[in-house]
Amino acid sequence: MGSWFSRATGDKSPTRDGERRPLVLSDLPESCLAMVLAFLDPPDICNLARTSRFFHRASSSDFIWEPKLPENYRILAEKLLSYKGSNECLGKKDIYAGLCCPVRFSGGRKEVWMDKEGGGICMLVSWKGMKITGIDDRRYWSHIPTLQSRFQAIAYLHQIWWLEVEGDLEFEFPAGRYSLYFRLKLGRPSESTTSQRIHGWNIKPVRFQYWLSNGEHGTSDHFLNVNGKWLRYHVGDFVVQDSYTPTKINFSMTQIDCTHQKAGLALDSVFICPKQ
């Protein structure tokens, strides 16, 4: 790029011995390069910043990063970064990087981070943060440690007649459209093949629902018929219109037909992310 620039301008810069050398990229004003970087996506900016000190300095300009932050980034910074007043003390690049790092809250039962590509908020809610029928009765459920969950444990259903899982959260989501999923698996975490202990999920569908504080409601029904794989079951999409007012979301998963038992279900979390 530097050689192209020198050919395009035909200009040369003086050296110590009075000779003139071709202009290179580092001869450009840092502010000019920063204006170019502002048109790139955050991952591309970070990749270029690692190539040289010149790019690294140019990539630190606040005007590059502020448009890529959510409009309520000051609220998010106060809520998620390590100390009060962080949105005033840190540069916009540092705030962006800090918000992209997963942060646990609600006793470690919820995790939130900012999507690097689009600047929307993603959130995980562990099964430990939900109300689950019979969860403390070992005849029905086991709590199994596993690296297959970001929370290092899942809830495994041995058998039950009445399945009911409920949860809620409240957060200042940036305005936009979001999707909500339950992360489930038929079978134990260590199993990848069909097990005789899995039954009751192909008779009636499981009902998934969500409710928003503004009255919005969504529902979907899914038969659970894929064994041995973690899947995200889509509950629905919802819209956040006000970035500065906390959005309260209630969600549930039920199969309350008591004509048959259900067994062999692993429950990990609820996942919320910007709609792709």
Image (cartoon, rainbow, N blue to C red):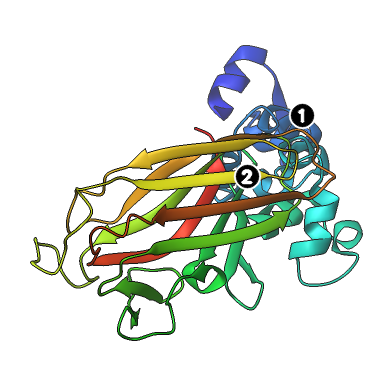
Q: Position of residue 117 (x, y in %)?
A: 56, 39
Is residue 12 in view?
yes
Taking the spot 58% from the left edge, 55% from the top edge, the residue there is: 123
Mark 1: few, some, or many residues within 10 Å (few <14, many ≥20)?
Answer: few
Disc 1 is placed on an element classified as: helix
Give yes or no for contact between labels 2 and 1 (Cβ–Cβ under 8 Å): no
Q: Residue under label 1, please give it.
A: 32
Q: Residue at x 83, y 72 (%)?
A: 83
Q: Quadrant of residue 243?
A: top right
Q: Quadrant of residue 194?
A: bottom left
What x and y, as percent, mark residue 113? 61, 56
Amino acid type at circle 1 is Cys
The image shows residue 273 at horizontal and vertical percentages of 55, 45
Q: Which residue is mark 2?
A: 211
Q: Which of the 4 quarters of the picture holds residue 29?
A: top right
Task: Classify residue 41 as left or right of residue 152.
Answer: right
The answer to whether 267 appears left or right of 198 in the picture is right
In the image, is 167 to the left or to the right of 240? Answer: left
For the residues labelled 2 and 1, the Cα–Cα distance comes to 48 Å
212 on left or right of 221: right
Residue at 72% x, 48% y: name it: 57
